[in-house]
Image: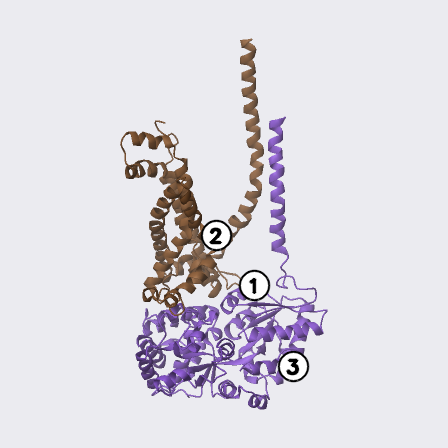
Chain colours: A brown, B purple
Amino acid sequence: MTATFVDRRRQSREESASVASGKTGRIAWLAIPALVFFIAFAVIPLAGVLILSFTNWDGIGAITPAGFANWAEMLTDPDMYHALWLTLAVMVLSWLVQTPLSLLLGVFTAGTQKYRAVLAVLYFLPLLLSSAAIAVAYKALLDPNFGLGAGLGLPFLSQDWLGNPQLAFSVVIFIIAWQFIPFHTLIYQGGVRQIPRSIYEAAEIDGAGRVKQFFFITIPQLKYTIITSSTLMTVGALTYFDLIFVLTGGGPANATRILPLDMYLLGFRANLMGPASVIAVILVVIGLALALFLQRLGGTDKSSSQLDGM
Amino acid sequence: METKATPSRRTFISLAIAAPLLTWGLTSCGTTGPGGGGAAAGGASMWALSGDPNETIRKNSVDAFNKKNPKTPLKLTFFQNDAYKTKIKTAIGAGQAPTMIYGWGGGTLKSYADAGQVEDLTSWFEENPDVKDRLFAGAFGAATVDGKIYAIPIQAVQPVVFFYNKELFKQVGAEPPATWSDVMSLVKTFNDAGIAPFSLGGQSRWTSMMWLQYMFDRVGGPEVFTDIFNGKADAWSHPAALEALTKIQELVKADGFIKGFNSITADSNADQALLYTGKAAMMLHGSWTYGGMKNDGGGFVQDGKLGWVPFPAVEGGVGDPKNAVGNPCNYLSISSKASDEEKSAAKKYFTESLSNDDEVAAFIETGAVPVVNGIEDQIKETEESDFLSHVYELGANAPAFQQSWDQALSPTAAEALLNNIDQLFVLSITPEKFAQNMNETLGK
């Protein structure tokens, strides 16, 4: 009786092992559509851009080889470094503005009270709007002569928001935050809801207040959520284009001409596809390096756990 | 059995999802041929600029043509000015250009011609002298590259006009300016009265460029830009150029332009609105804005509140105050990638419909001077005769008429120019720095 039982258990274990391996074999096929798209729309264009960066092309005529001329020119171009600096500034400032706010909002909306659910729905509204629509709307609202300030008769709001280089940059940071905080709030909301209730209960018994619970339980438990959100934020900063393009076009006086916009203007306005491709390659390298760095921050130690002692 | 079935069902589902996606991916690459998006067989396509009055006139003209030629209808698509300039370049580079390419001639047309993307129309014009002789001879200059004609002049002469709001001038008791010092004193008068002196859609940048063009001409004459156009070394550092740039910055520093001009775009027509709503007293803009202000200004033009004068002379300058700047007109080229049927349909449209009597009448009615010979009498008879004579004077009789710089120069130099103009108007670079930056683009 027992022998047959053990046998059957062993048998079923072997069976399930063989089924599992068969599964992964077939599941690999499922990756093919994604792989085809990835190669067609990411790898091939990427290789194309790398090749183009060593050529001269006006986008219309023949492509002629240029050797390292474009690279030498771009790497000594002060405008490129200005754009790079602005891109980094957007990245860091966006992170500094968005992370605390979306973290707090995420914790807030993770609560189960009814009014929080209602507010959460309102907070997520900007998520539904396209960047171009947001830019057009803000441009109209911030117009110094026909905008919100003039309409409401509030002189404070009639600043030259998009015409003054310093103000324009801050406005861009603000609108980016307005647009993306809802998304990151959603990520943090999900993260907070996954934290086991029992940890908080244990903390309460130990006499930890709400603030202490936030700093010593919520934030450490959200480590991976923070890394995910930060990766999306910082790497995303390398792709902000549509919003700024519609809002300021990179002006005034290049105050908002970040690298992706610089790339577009060089390539499609000035017809300098070679130098624009150099910028594209630089953007890819920075993006990959950032993503790698942030993944490393998460730690590669597989034995470490967030639920120690549970 | 059960466990076996699951993955295969998943494979099936994933394939079912992937298949339409794949076909979508393939078809979206394949369907847009040179017709630029599904033109009927044998029919040609045309891209044009949105914004009235030109949009309606072009649409009516194409509708009339399609009614007469139901077998070869034209497909017409409109785009916003600034967006179009980028889109058309990309489309041509990708071999997806429409049959008829709308443009401004000059440096951009040269880049198309050099790449063999537009049809050489020289022999066609020789075979159809009626078409050619009907149009302003001067308009063919910007359509000609190395002695060959690559485009047909269309629509209207578009000089840049110095507009002013008569009502506001009456209110402060001022006269329109005749000299640059008049301009500077008017700036003070209007600022003291709480009215912005000049409206400007500075974010579009070519709007600010029109100021430089007139100033360069009035201070140093048309030769200053001719040297730049020909790529003469250090041409931007000409003393007259530096003086003109300095004067412009003085105007900016004196609050000559409306607050926030850097964030106003011309595409939204907000700059025109500032003039007809009485927020700004003067505006330097293309003659086409007359039609726009007539449409949108709610009687501003009809009630005679809009005034215009030639651009003021600059004391000590050598330029003739009768000289003008602007677009000689617009142009249509034929894509060399179009099929023979599309090309002949386009040429048929050129002979039958472009600048025909209906179109000429429609342009004159909106306050524009079409690029057609022998319309002086027609102009005098219309209610717009005052403005039209002014435009005719600027466009057809000016001693020197300079094409818009951003169109005359190569796209590379033009983009650098616009970028530096933006910085010049925000006062973030000096005239010397501007000249130095621009000297590097000479011959590019």
Frontmost of labels 3 and 2 is 2
Q: Which mark is residue A128?
A: 2
Rounded to the nearest whole Å, what is the CA distance between mark 2 and mark 1? 30 Å
The residue nearer to you, when weighing B314 against B241, is B314
- Contact flag, marks 2 and 1 (Cβ < 8 Å): no
On what subunit does the disc labeled 2 rest? Answer: A
**Quadrant of image for the N terminus of chain A:** top right
Let me know if marks 3 and 2 both belong to one chain: no
Q: Identify the residue under disc 1.
A: B91
Q: Quadrant of the C terminus of chain A?
A: top left
Crowding at dot 1, Cα within 10 Å, few <14 / some 14-19 / many 20+, comes out as some
Residue A223 picture location, percent across and down: 36, 38
Whether discs 3 and 1 lie on one chain: the answer is: yes
Q: Determine if residue A248 is in view.
A: no
Question: Which of the marked residues, 3 or 1, is nearer the chain's N terminus?
Answer: 1
Numbered circle sitting on residue B15: none
Cα distance in 3D space between marks 3 and 2: 58 Å
Kind of residue indicated by mark 2:
Leu
Give me the residue at 58% from left, 91% from top: B377
Nearer to us in this view, A30 or B299: B299
| Mark pair 3, 1: CA separation | 30 Å
- What residue appears at the point 57 percent right and 26 percent down from the top-left corner? A19
Q: Reply above or below: A39 against A167.
A: above
